[in-house]
Image (cartoon, coloured by chain):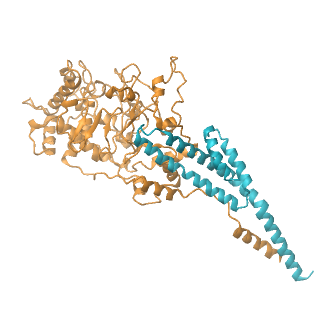
Chain colours: A cyan, B orange
Amino acid sequence: MSRAKEISLILIATVLVAEFTLTHLWPAIYFQSMYQEYYHSVVACQKAKESFQRTQEIPNDLARHLKRKLLLASKVELSSCNESEILKNKLTSNGIELSKLKVIYLEALEHKDISLSSLVASYEEEKKYD
Amino acid sequence: MIKFAVRILPIFLFIFINPPCSVAIENGLLLRKIIRQSYIRPLVTKPFEKTKRFLLGQALFFDPILSGNRDVSCATCHLLKLGTSDAVALAIGTQGMGLGVARKINSRDVVPRNSLDLWNRDNNSAKSLFWDGRVEVLDPKNKIFRSPLKEILPKGLENILAVQALFPLARDDEMLGLPGDNSPKYLPPKHANLPNEISEGAKNLMGPKKIMAVHSLLMERLLGLKRNKLKTWQIEYRKLFQEAYPDKSTSDFSIVELGNAIAHFEEIAFATRNTPWDEYLSGNNNIISKKAKKGAIIFFGKGKCAVCHSGPLFSDFEFYSLSVKQIGPGTNMSGDDKGRYNVTNKEKDKYKFRTPPLRNVTLTAPYFHDGVALTLQEAISHHLEPHFLADKYDETGTYELNIEQIQSLSFVLKNKIYLSEFEITALMEFLKTLEDNQVEMQEHIIPESVPSGLPISALRNESIQ
């Protein structure tokens, strides 16, 4: 085999290996390593939304200054949704399909600490993934 | 050539693949944002200075001569070594023996409440003192206070801390003792086995009149205002008072000067001046760990801690019920303590207690009004599950919490707060940053001796078990 053919074959093999690694192997490894973190970030975000919603429902006549401070705390808590969004972008940019993320998202919504009312509220959020 | 390919493949992969490192948001940036939004500033404290008034306050704070039975001082339940508290669930006043966890009751019951710490009560953030807020500042500018002395509270008390200092002196279970008591035999001969003339002199009085009588008898013991032949400590105290208040004469000295001097000593001696948190607020980003920053974000956000633990001392000095289980005799001596209700008589105040400040909180276990939470972790966990004991029974077969305690729970906690174990440890790491790391070195505030010659209540480094 000529030297040129040999180089071509090695390059093709390299490209194929890289392609396989990037499209199959790497996303699988990445998915495994980030699954828990993404799952927990979705749960945290959902709970933050739930908490914010509950705080907003507190009647205004009931200790206004406390409601104001609770809303402030809830807004800080909502920063966990930003974290969840960053993770989602990171996962998709590493080749993980949106459908897989949707599955994790639905699993997270079944978490024992998330109430039924917030599941209804999260329907809109869920649609974003479709 | 194959070797070449093997070499370039990892480089190729490294360039194109994003490594799966954690994408947690940079906590520092978020925390700085929260700090800016919430206008959180480093705590300003008074500089340490041993003035004449400081020296008088120091002597009074540590001298057991202020107690009816000459056996307890302020320092007995406010030990520097134990974070200005006493490390026991319920304080043990007169007739007790030992200090800190080694303190034992003798012939009396315990004080119904946990000793509060004394840190940083100098910056006018403390709107109320005591667990039930029975001492309150109504107008700091014009120095108008509400207290158990009501309208007969003497004029001239400089701040809420000075007002507070007057009341443990007149409580039977804390410092006063009972009529018929004698001072312990183990005291130095000139103080041993003496009748409690203060309690005896006020025995037929009640309420504010009793408190005033106790104060007047105490000043007589301290300064011998009606005597010709003075005791050695009376000569010494007259000198200390005179130096601390050079514009006044001996006959002018009253409980007001005593309260002001103790308050002055407390605000100078018990100030946190070296906390990592304040240094972080001053701009040193690396002084607290990443975990502590995460904990701070939880404190101000998800944990909802800052809703009540707000302000420079991490307390809003308001009153809330956390449905805390009652232990000990309670204020009614039958195992119940209705907290703020005892002061206001309003139904809505039942089982409410004042938000405790959190500076040096890591040093002041146990926690809550009756010290029922032995550790900080236990105290935090209670906030997450305040009704954990709601349907449980104690050894007598009665519910651990009564229905009123359950119903009184603050609405801040009614919406359940979820924190993972990691988040709780992060929160504790943050609370650790509120600890003054120089407390160990503040032994110099403990005097070598006091004018009465009575033993000083203090745990020094070498005496800690």
Q: Which corner quadrant holds the N terminus of chain B?
A: bottom right
B168 vs B31, left or right, is left
Q: Position of residue B331 (x, y in %)?
A: 36, 24
The residue that appears at 28% across and 51% down in the rendered structure is B46
A71 vs B108, left or right, is right
Q: Is residue B331 visible?
A: yes
Q: Position of residue B308 (x, y in %)?
A: 42, 41
Q: Is residue B269 above or below residue B454?
A: below
Quarter residue B154 falls in: top left
Q: Position of residue A16 (x, y in %)?
A: 83, 69
Q: Is residue B13 above or below residue B174?
A: below
Count of picture labels:
0
Q: Residue furthest left?
A: B228
Q: Is residue B457 visible?
A: no
Q: Is residue B65 above or below residue A96?
A: above
Q: Nearer the viewer, residue A81 or B108?
A: A81
Q: Nearer the viewer, residue B329 or B143?
A: B143
B347 vs B293, left or right, is left
The residue that appears at 64% across and 48% down in the rendered structure is A124
Q: Position of residue B27 (x, y in %)?
A: 52, 56
Quarter residue B83 falls in: top left
Q: Which corner quadrant holds the C terminus of chain B?
A: top left
Quarter residue B129 falls in: top left
